[in-house]
Amino acid sequence: MKAVNILLLCSTISGITPTVFSSDLRATIGTYPDYDGDLIVSGDIEITFDEYAMSFLFNGKGLEAGCGPGCGVHIHTGTTCSDADLVGGHYWAPADTDDPWMNDVTYYDSDYFGNAIGQF
């Protein structure tokens, strides 16, 4: 079976950085730029980290029903969701290591209604 990648979620992340070593970032999920399908997606993401650990929480609605395994959530290098060409590639550092967004940890399964939650 061949995996199909449908881009349908996009969000910009904002946050308050009290120190260099910790942060709490939040994003509201919307439709990916130039997506012309019938799904109306929504949800939120919360990322918290400090100098020792990171937590990524995902809550999505309106996704493809029964999607998975293999539907994924990723952070991209861009800073806008208004133009698909500016979303950019997957974000990670250092760039000479394997892409952490291409593994089973960042995949989710949606339910019969198109809802999905996850964390890593």
Image (cartoon, rainbow, N blue to C red):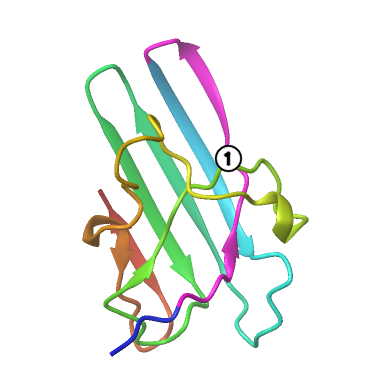
Q: 109 or 98, which is in the foreground?
A: 98
- Give the x, y percent position of residue 10: 60, 58
Determine whether, in the image, residue 75 is placed left or right of residue 51: right
Vertical order, 70 against 10 (above or below): below
- Give the x, y percent position of residue 64: 46, 83
- Give the x, y percent position of residue 17: 51, 18
Determine whether, in the image, residue 45 is placed left or right of residue 11: left
Which residue does the image show at 62% across and 77% down from the upper left? Answer: 40
For residue 66: magenta? Answer: no
Q: 26 or 6, which is in the foreground?
A: 6
Which residue does the image show at 31% across and 47% down from the upper left? Answer: 100
The N terminus sits in image quarter: bottom left
Which residue does the image show at 34% across and 44% down from the upper left? Answer: 56
Residue 94 falls in which quadrant of the image? Answer: top left
Look at the image and give the residue range highlighted in magenta: 5-21
Vertical order, 63 against 76 (above or below): below
Give the residue pinned by disc 1.
13
Residue 73 falls in which quadrant of the image? Answer: bottom left
SS assignment at label 1? loop
- Give the x, y percent position of residue 72: 38, 65
Q: How many numbered marks appear?
A: 1
For residue 11: magenta? Answer: yes
